[in-house]
Image (spheres, rainbow, N blue to C red):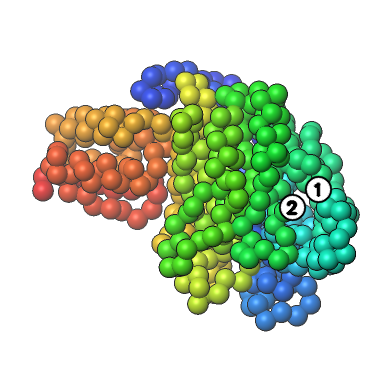
């Protein structure tokens, strides 16, 4: 286990919003998985309870071990964003806890650094229906709904370590905190009842009010820690490239949650539910950027009739440093995908996210364009081509620019400055700019 967020003993100079400042180098790695659907919806026989037609993959975890060794994956935390099981049975939670311990061991995470939120499939709908039709009070219904999850030792111990709150009692959120990271887990599935279609998830307004109050009390905004909120249902509308139908499964009261997250300087929101991985940035009137990672599915069977090649995924959030000007993290999200017959790969699926995507450069697009233009023109005074590595070495923060914005800016400058873009395979040398058109 590596020391989380270990600071080097030296400092360096980087540029945050074009202001050169001294800052310590940070190292934090967080493994993200979601939607395992342990049981009859799992794609791997290692995650299936009994026989299942969906369990078509073998050696799933051995291939993950090979990936971890090949890519030197060693993390500080493991976060599971819900739908851990498919039917919330005792047997499914027992198998899920065993597999999560194995995954944690594979990526070098101690069990005390594993965190989760329940998904809609982690509530036992059979028990919930029996309770609701018997007109039992809501507290009894919630107890029965989560009985198999509550009494599983692994998940119980995880929740017992929380500094505040519980997923099964009002206000249905929990908070963990160490020297480097605040984790806020919100149960959006408590009132996502068995008969809801679609299962969009709900956070009641009174629970959001309590969340706002608690975060204000803790004063987490712009602290030296990274603030990460985990929830199962998606709080923003994400593009669904494989689907034409409207998505009605977005979280109820999502707009209020997003305002609270922005107000209290949440750096990352991690969610599951949607099995198509996405990474987006959100900002509102508080003008605080929130990176939102939809984790996709780690081990559910994804039907090609609907998902059109969307792979199973595992992600690693890597935080390199915290900008002393903005108090926001800079780093990247690394994603590996699993396709049958190919194992875990550095996939670039159009129905997912790139193998590497970056976050943290808060320079305005117009200023980014100005800086890049100045650098490119300076290089062209003495040479005929410019490599991506030369630009990123010349201007440190550029590497943390989202690849969409970077690509658009370079395309815009190609006509303005006069150069041809040659894309190169791999992440270390994204492109070469050749002088002249």
- Residue corresponding to mark 1: 168
Residue at (21, 29) in percent of width and height: 374
Image quadrant for the N terminus?
top right
- Above or below, comparing residue 322 to residue 200 in the picture: above
Foreground pick, 300 / 135: 135
Q: Is residue 33 visible?
A: no
Q: What element carries label 1?
A: loop
User: Can you give x and y, in whole percent of width and height, for residue 18 in the image?
Assistant: 35, 23
Question: Which label's residue is closer to the chain start, 2 or 1?
Answer: 1
Label 1: few (<14), some or many (≥20) within 10 Å? some
Residue at (52, 53) in percent of width and height: 335
User: Can you give x and y, in whole percent of width and height, for residue 266 in the image?
Assistant: 58, 34
Query: Which residue occupies the extreme front position in the image?
Result: 135
- Above or below, comparing residue 182 to residue 203 in the picture: above
Q: Is residue 208 visible?
A: yes
Q: In which quarter of the image is residue 364?
A: top left
Q: Do the residues labelled 2 and 1 touch (CB within 8 Å)?
A: yes
Q: What element carries label 2?
A: loop
Q: In which quarter of the image is residue 126?
A: bottom right
- Residue corresponding to mark 2: 190
Residue at (28, 53) in percent of width and height: 423
Residue at (64, 72) in percent of width and height: 43
């Amino acid at each position: 286990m590596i020391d989380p967020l270990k600071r080097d003993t030296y400092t360096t100079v980087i540029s945050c919003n074009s202001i050169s400042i001294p800052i310590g180098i940070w190292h934090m790695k967080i493994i993200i998985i979601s939607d395992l659907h342990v049981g009859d919806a799992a794609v791997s026989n290692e995650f299936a309870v009994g026989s299942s037609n969906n369990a078509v993959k073998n050696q799933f975890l051995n291939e993950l071990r090979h990936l971890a060794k090949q890519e030197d994956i060693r993390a500080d935390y493991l976060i599971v964003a819900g739908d851990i099981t498919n039917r919330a049975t005792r047997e499914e939670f027992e198998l899920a806890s065993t597999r999560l311990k194995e995954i944690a061991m594979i990526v070098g995470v101690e069990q005390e650094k594993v965190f989760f939120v329940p998904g809609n499939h982690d509530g036992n709908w059979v028990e919930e229906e029996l309770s609701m039709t018997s007109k039992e009070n809501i507290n009894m219904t919630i107890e029965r709904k989560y009985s198999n999850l509550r009494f599983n030792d692994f998940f119980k111990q995880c929740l017992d370590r929380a500094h505040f709150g519980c997923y099964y009692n009002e206000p249905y959120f929990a908070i963990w905190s160490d020297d480097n990271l605040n984790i806020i887990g919100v149960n959006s599935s408590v009132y996502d009842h068995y008969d809801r279609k679609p299962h969009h998830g709900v956070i009641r307004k009174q629970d959001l009010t309590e969340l706002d109050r608690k975060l204000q009390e803790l004063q987490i905004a712009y602290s030296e820690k990274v603030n990460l909120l985990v929830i199962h249902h998606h709080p923003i509308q994400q593009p669904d490239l494989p689907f034409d139908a409207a998505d009605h499964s977005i979280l109820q009261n999502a707009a209020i949650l997003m305002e609270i997250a922005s107000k209290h300087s949440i750096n990352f929101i991690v969610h599951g539910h949607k099995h198509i991985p996405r990474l987006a940035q959100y900002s509102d009137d508080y003008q605080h950027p929130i990176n939102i990672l939809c984790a996709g599915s780690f081990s559910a069977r994804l039907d090609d009739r609907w998902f059109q090649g969307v792979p199973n995924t595992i992600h690693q959030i890597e935080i390199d440093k915290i900008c002393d000007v903005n108090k926001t993290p800079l780093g990247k999200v690394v994603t590996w995908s699993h396709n049958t017959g190919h194992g875990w790969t550095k996939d670039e699926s159009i129905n997912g996210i790139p193998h590497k995507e970056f976050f943290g450069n808060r320079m305005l697009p117009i200023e980014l364009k100005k800086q890049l233009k100045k650098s490119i023109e300076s290089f062209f005074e003495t040479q005929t081509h410019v490599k991506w590595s030369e630009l990123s070495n010349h201007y440190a923060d550029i590497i943390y620019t989202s690849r969409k914005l970077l690509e658009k800016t370079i395309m815009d400058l190609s006509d303005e400055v006069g150069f041809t873009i040659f894309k190169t395979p791999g992440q270390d040398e994204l492109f070469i700019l050749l002088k002249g058109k």
